[in-house]
Image: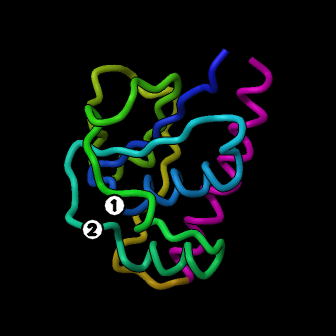
């Protein structure tokens, strides 16, 4: 059986969902296929997110990822909303989970690192949850 596809969804697909895709691949890429998408796109990934993911994990998101809409990714087995503080994007089905993460855009590195760490913890919890199914 193929790997389960996990999609992280944000409205803009430029910050939280991109970091989740990168961390998912980094931590559990051997077990699941990770994607991120939005209902709108931005011309580039959030530059603070890019800088901090490079600094913390040595991942260059701009090399491997770009802002894209939900219809540009394979149909996921699991769809996770990053947080509905800006209104939940509609993807044609219910979300399997809403992580309720605050958008760190425009905030300090400390706020960004908190969100990155929260994403890391939740991805590792996801592995636990999925392997119990």
Could you tell me residue 94's position as x and y percent?
39, 22
Q: Is residue 115 above or below residue 83?
A: below
Please check the rendered image and state whether residue 116 is part of the magenta-colored stretch, yes or no: yes
Could you tell me residue 129's position as x and y percent?
73, 30
Please check the rendered image and state whether residue 115 is part of the magenta-colored stretch, yes or no: yes
**Dot 2: few (<14), some (14–19), or many (≥20) neighbours within 10 Å?**
some
Q: Quadrant of the N terminus?
A: top right
Could you tell me residue 96's position as x and y percent?
51, 27
- Kindly report the distance in space between the C-alpha atoms of the residues bearing marks 1 and 2: 7 Å
- Residue farthest front in this picture: 63
Q: Which residue is located at x 42 percent, y 79 percent?
A: 48
Q: Is residue 16 above or below residue 105?
A: above
Q: Which residue is located at x 73 percent, y 42 percent?
A: 125
Please indicate whether residue 10 sits to the left or right of residue 79 in the image: left
> Mostly what secondary structure, the magenta segment?
helix
Question: Which is more toward the observer, 118 or 74?
Answer: 74
Could you tell me residue 17's position as x and y percent?
44, 52
Question: Which is more toward the observer, 110 or 32?
Answer: 32
Question: Pointer 1: what residue?
Answer: 14
Range drawn in magenta: 110-133
Q: Quadrant of the C terminus?
A: top right
Q: Which residue is located at x 60 percent, y 26 percent?
A: 4
Q: Which residue is located at x 29 percent, y 45 percent?
A: 38
Q: Secondary structure at mark 1?
A: loop
Q: Are marks 1 and 2 in contact (CB under 8 Å)?
A: yes
Question: Pointer 2: what residue?
Answer: 44
Please indicate whether residue 80 sits to the left or right of residue 13 in the image: right
**Dot 1: few (<14), some (14–19), or many (≥20) neighbours within 10 Å?**
many
Count of numbered marks: 2
Please indicate whether residue 24 sits to the left or right of residue 44 in the image: right
């Amino acid at each position: 059986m193929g790997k389960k596809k996990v999609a992280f969804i944000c409205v803009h697909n430029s910050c939280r969902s991109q970091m989740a895709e990168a961390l998912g691949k980094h931590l559990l890429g051997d077990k699941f296929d990770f994607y991120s998408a939005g209902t709108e796109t931005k011309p580039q990934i959030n530059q603070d997110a890019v800088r901090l993911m490079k600094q913390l994990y040595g991942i260059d998101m701009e090399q491997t990822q770009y802002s894209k809409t939900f219809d540009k990714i394979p149909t996921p087995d699991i769809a996770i909303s990053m947080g509905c503080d800006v209104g939940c994007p509609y993807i044609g089905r219910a979300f399997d989970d809403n992580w309720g993460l605050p958008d760190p855009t425009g905030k300090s590195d400390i706020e960004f690192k908190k969100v990155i760490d929260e994403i890391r913890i939740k991805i590792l919890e996801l592995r636990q949850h999925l392997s119990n199914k």
